[in-house]
């Protein structure tokens, strides 16, 4: 079926060319096997999913509407009654127990549907020499993964602004102050952050950090003791080190993501140290699902000699215990708006998710 887009997007091979044989590419792209291949690529490239921070929840699949309602029972809270042999014991003074209710509440998660379309003129098949399936899947899956990560981080930014503000710890240096070891990611700060959850601190097992924070951990992992004139001190020594990757820190699995937010200190001036956000979480604290599978569709424009392809995905990413109340079709800016989120559970300690802001000796400064 022909589709008249009214504009020709392609002329000659250039950086925007994404296939050598666009006809073959779109045929492959619309096959069931390709859709499955692309989905697998997204999962494999997503460090958040690998870490267990995001977990698929079957209850969130194939739902209808623009918001998902997730009712839940509140924490059990009743008044204990004292019993004796009189005729007036109990809360009601009637010599009998007074029945009490176990209440329930609800929370709302937002669904987003997003995508993009591509076009290439048919001459590309004669003028380039790329493999269609490999080229499309390599570029598209990485871009989609980046966009999904950006969406989730926007959501976390909004949540920690109000709903989960009690689960935040900022140990970064204040304006005009030069950071030292107490402002960096260390075991003491991680432990303090975990215990914002009280008894639930043991549920935390994932630590998401910025690459510049990871660089500090990597360098410290190569420190050794050195005796200097009778004084024992640390010294940098990478001799014989075959792997510098930091898989765990303070018992938490480390996930490195360059999209986690940087933080400018309050009233920060030029030269002040930037803060770097870290997330501590329990596995599966973010639940995900979709109303329909990844959609890849293809058509052609006979007037402009173009082949067209669109990619559409639908998903919900919901932090259990929180509720969304903003625009039902949110942009990332809506998700990052603290006024669009509320705490559904009775206490933020029931949500095993923490935000911590630190400095790093490898960090940048305010321009």
Image: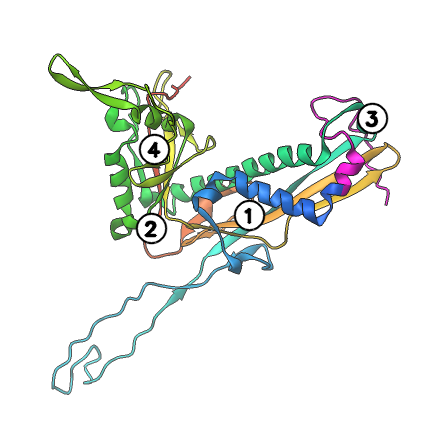
Q: CA distance from mark 3 to mark 1?
A: 46 Å
Tell whether 223 sits left or right of 323.
Answer: left
Q: CA distance from mark 4 to mark 1?
A: 29 Å
- Give the number of the disc on residue 348: 2
SS for tag 1?
Answer: loop
Give the residue number, with chain letter if any, for mark 4. 357
Q: Position of residue 112 (x, y in %)?
A: 58, 47
Earlier in the chain: of badge 1 and badge 2, it is 1
Give the residue number, with chain letter if any, for mark 3. 126
Give the residue number, with chain letter if any, for mark 1. 327
Tell whether 39 sits left or right of 8.
Answer: left
78, above or below 173, in the image: below
Earlier in the chain: of badge 4 and badge 1, it is 1
Tell whether 6 sits left or right of 292.
Answer: right
Dot in front, 4 or 3: 3
Q: CA distance from mark 1 to mark 2?
A: 24 Å
Earlier in the chain: of badge 3 and badge 1, it is 3
Label 3, residues with CA under 10 Å away: few <14, some 14-19, many ≥20: few
Q: Position of residue 50 (x, y in %)?
A: 47, 43
* Labels 3 & 1 near each other (Cβ < 8 A): no
Residue 15 colored in magenta in the image:
yes
Between residue 158 and residue 228, name the one nearer to us: 228
Dot in front, 3 or 2: 3
Residue 63 in which image quadrant: bottom right
Query: Where are the magenta residues, as a range?
Result: 1-27
């Amino acid at each position: 079926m022909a589709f008249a887009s009214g504009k020709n997007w392609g002329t000659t091979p250039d950086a925007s060319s994404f296939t050598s044989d666009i006809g073959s590419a779109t045929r492959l792209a619309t096959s069931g096997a390709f859709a499955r291949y692309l989905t697998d690529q997204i999962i494999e490239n997503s460090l958040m999913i690998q870490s267990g921070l995001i977990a698929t929840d079957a209850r969130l699949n194939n739902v209808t509407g623009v918001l998902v309602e997730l009712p839940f029972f509140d924490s059990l809270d009743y008044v204990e009654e004292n019993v004796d042999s009189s005729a007036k014991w109990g809360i009601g003074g009637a010599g009998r127990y007074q029945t009490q209710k176990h209440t329930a509440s609800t929370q709302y998660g937002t669904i987003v549907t997003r995508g993009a379309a591509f076009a290439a003129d048919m001459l590309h098949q004669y003028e380039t020499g790329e493999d269609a399936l490999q080229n499309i899947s390599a570029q598209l899956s990485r871009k989609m993964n980046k966009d999904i990560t950006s969406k989730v981080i926007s959501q976390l930014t909004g949540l920690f602004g109000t709903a989960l503000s009690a689960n935040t710890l900022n140990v970064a240096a204040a304006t005009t102050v030069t950071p030292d070891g107490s402002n960096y990611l260390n075991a003491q700060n991680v432990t303090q952050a975990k215990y914002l959850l009280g008894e639930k601190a043991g549920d935390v097992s994932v630590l998401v950090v910025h690459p510049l924070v990871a660089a500090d951990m990597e360098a410290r992992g190569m420190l050794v003791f050195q005796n200097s004139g009778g004084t024992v001190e640390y010294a940098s020594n990478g001799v014989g080190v075959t792997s510098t990757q930091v898989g765990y820190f303070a018992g938490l699995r480390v996930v490195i993501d360059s999209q986690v937010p940087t933080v400018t200190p309050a009233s920060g001036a030029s030269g002040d140290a930037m803060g770097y956000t870290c997330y501590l979480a329990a596995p599966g604290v973010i639940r995900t699902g979709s109303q329909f599978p990844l959609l890849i569709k293809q058509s052609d424009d006979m007037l402009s000699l173009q082949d067209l392809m669109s990619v559409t995905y639908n998903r919900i990413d919901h932090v259990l215990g929180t509720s969304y109340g903003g625009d039902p079709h949110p942009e990332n800016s809506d998700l990052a708006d603290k006024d669009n989120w509320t705490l559904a559970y009775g206490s933020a300690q029931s949500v095993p998710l923490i935000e911590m802001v630190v400095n790093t000796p490898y960090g940048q400064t305010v321009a």
